[in-house]
Amino acid sequence: MSISFSWAFLVAPGATGRLVRGLFDNTFAGVHQLAWFDWAMLIPYFTILVILSVYGIHRYDIIRTYFKLRKNATKEPARRFEQLPPVTIQLPLYNERYVVERLIEETVKMEYPKELLQIQVLDDSTDDTAPFAEALVERYRNMGYPIEYHHRNHRHGYKAGALQAGLETAAGEFVAVFDADFCPPPEFLLRTIHHFADPKVGVVQTRWSYLNRDYNFLTEVEAMLLDGHFILEQGARSRAGYFFNFNGTAGILRKSMIDDAGGWQHDTLTEDSDLSYRAQLKGWRFVYMPGLDCPSELPVQMHGFQVQQSRWAKGLTQVAKKLLPAILKSDMTKRQKAEAVLHLTPNISYPLMIVISALLLPVMIVRFYMGWWEMMLIDLPLIAASFWSISLFYVVAQRELYPKNWKRSVLLLPMLMAVGVGLTIVNTRAVLEALFGVQTAFARTPKYNIGGAQMNLENKKYRRRSGWLPYAELAVGAYFAAMVGFAIETLNFAAIPFLLLFVFGYWWAGGATLYEEHQSRLHWLKQRRLALSAARQL
C-alpha cells in the first residue's frame, strides 16, 4: 500500500495581480520567452507529474473494476470437505511483550477439532518476551490445548526464516499465520478452510479490522489507508483475476503450495508478497474474503507507523526488482502484467516527490510568467489524475465499508494527505535502499495492546532512535513554509492551502517523532531513578 501525490495543484493559475491584469491588457503578451533554464526546470517537473498521474489514473481504474465486477465477489465455496483436514497455526513473535498474552489467549479459542489442530509459537525474542511466552504456552498445554513453543537463538531470515523453520515440524496440510498484534476470530478456520476443497486454491486471505481505530487522528488515518487497500485494491484484483498478495497475516496457506513456490524466502522484507507472486506464477489461485475480518492493532505513534510503512515500501520494491523480469516474460495477459507492474512499483513515487520538492520553488518562479490558459490546460488534468483520485479512492472505500457513517472520512482527507506527505523522506530512503541493494534488518513495529481511545501508553515504552529523520522532515517543512511566504508575496493565494498541507505534514511527522522520543526518554529516566532508589533502600 502506498500513496502517490501530484503537486501540480500547488502552483495554481493567476499567480499575481499583475498577471491577472495581463489577461485583459496583454501586458505580458509576447514579452517573456522561456529560456533554457526555464525548460530545464519545467521538463523534469512535468515529466515526473505525468508519471505520478499514471498511478492516480490507476486508482480510478481500481474503483471502476471493483464496481464493474461486483458479481465476481467471493461466494461460499462450491465444494466442502467431508472430513476436516489438519491445520497448523503459526504465531511468529519478536519482542512482543505487550501483546503475546492476548494473541495466545485468542488463538486457543479457535473453533476446530483439537486433534486436527497444531498451534506453533515461533519466538525469536531476545528480551523478557521469551520466558513469558514459554510459560504461557506451558500453561495452556497443561490445560489440554495443542500448543507448542519454538525458540530460535538467532534471527536468520527474520519472520520468513521463523515461518520456514516452523514448517519443518508443521503437522497440518494448511498453515494459518497471525502476527502478534492480531486477535483471530474463533470461526476463522471453519469459514476459510472449505475454500481449499478446490485443489487449485493456495491461499485464503481475510480482511484486517482495527481494535484501536479511534485511538487518535493517526490511527484513524492509518485505518482509512488500509481500508482502501483491503476494500478496493484487494477486492478489485481478486474479482478481476489479477495477481494479489497474501498480506502476511490473517490468512491461511496450503503447505504444498508454499513448497511448490520455493518456500519462504528472506531476500526481501515483504516475504508475503514475494511468496504470493511466485505461487501465482506457478498457477495457484488465491481467494479473498472481505466478509471475514481479523481485528488487529494499529501503530499509535508516528515513528512506529513510519517504520512499518518504510519496511513495506522497501520490501515491495525489492519484490518488484526480483520478480518483474519473470512476470513480464510469463504467459500472463498484458492486462495482468500491467496490473502487476502498477501493484509492485507505486513506491517509486516517493523519490520522485523529493525531486518535485526541490524543483517546486524555481518552477513557481518560472510559471509566474506563463499564461493562465496554458497553466489550466496542464494543471487541470494533472489535478484530476492525482489529487482527486486520492480523495475519491479513500472516500469510496469508507462508503463501501461504513455506508451509514462514512462522511467523517471526508473531513479526515487533509489529515490523510498530511500523513502521506510525512512518509515521503523515510520511504524515499527505503526505496533507494531497495534499488541499490542495501540490506537492512527487519524492523518490527512496536505494539502496546492498546484498544480504545481511553487507554494510554503509561508504563508501555520501547526505546526508539529515529536518528536524523525527524530533523530532515522539519527542515523540508521549513522549505515549504518559505514557499508559503513566496506565495503570499506574489499573491498566489490559491496555492497557499496546499503548501500549508505539506508544511503541516512534514512538521507533524518530525515534531511528533521528537516528542514521542522525548517522552520515552523521560519515562526511561523515571524508571532508572526508581530502580536506583530501590537499590539504595536495600
Image: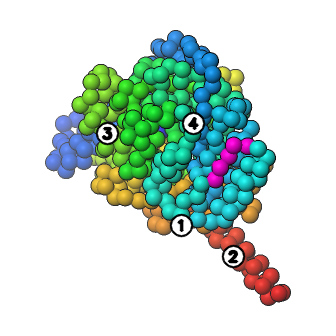
Q: Secondary structure at mark 1?
A: loop
Q: Earlier in the sequence, mark 2 or mark 3?
A: 3
Question: Which residue is denoted by mark 2 in the rendering?
Answer: 525
Mark 3 or mark 4, whichever is nearer to me: 4
Q: Residues within 10 Å of mark 3 (few under 14, many from 20)?
A: some
The kind of secondary structure the magenta stretch mainly shows is strand
Tags 3 and 4 touching, CB below 8 Å:
no
Q: Residues within 10 Å of mark 1 (few under 14, many from 20)?
A: few
Answer with mark 1 or mark 3, whichever residue precedes in sequence: 3
Q: Secondary structure at mark 4?
A: loop
State the separation of the CA atoms marked 1 and 3: 33 Å
**Residue tagged by mark 4?**
172
Mark 3 and mark 4: Cα distance apart in space: 29 Å
Which corner quadrant of the image does residue 237 belong to?
top left
Q: Which residue is mark 1?
A: 465
Residue 373 makes an appearance in the image: no
Q: Nearer the viewer, mark 4 or mark 2?
A: 4
In this rendering, the label closer to the viewer, 1 or 4: 4
Seen in the image, is 246 located left or right of residue 377? right
Could you tell which of marks 1 and 4 lies nearer the N-terminus?
A: 4
Q: Quadrant of the C terminus?
A: bottom right
Residue that badge 3 annotates: 323
Chain-order first, disc 4 or disc 2: 4
Residue drawn at the location 62% of the way across and 18% of the way down: 82
Q: Residue at x 76, y 44 (%)?
A: 144
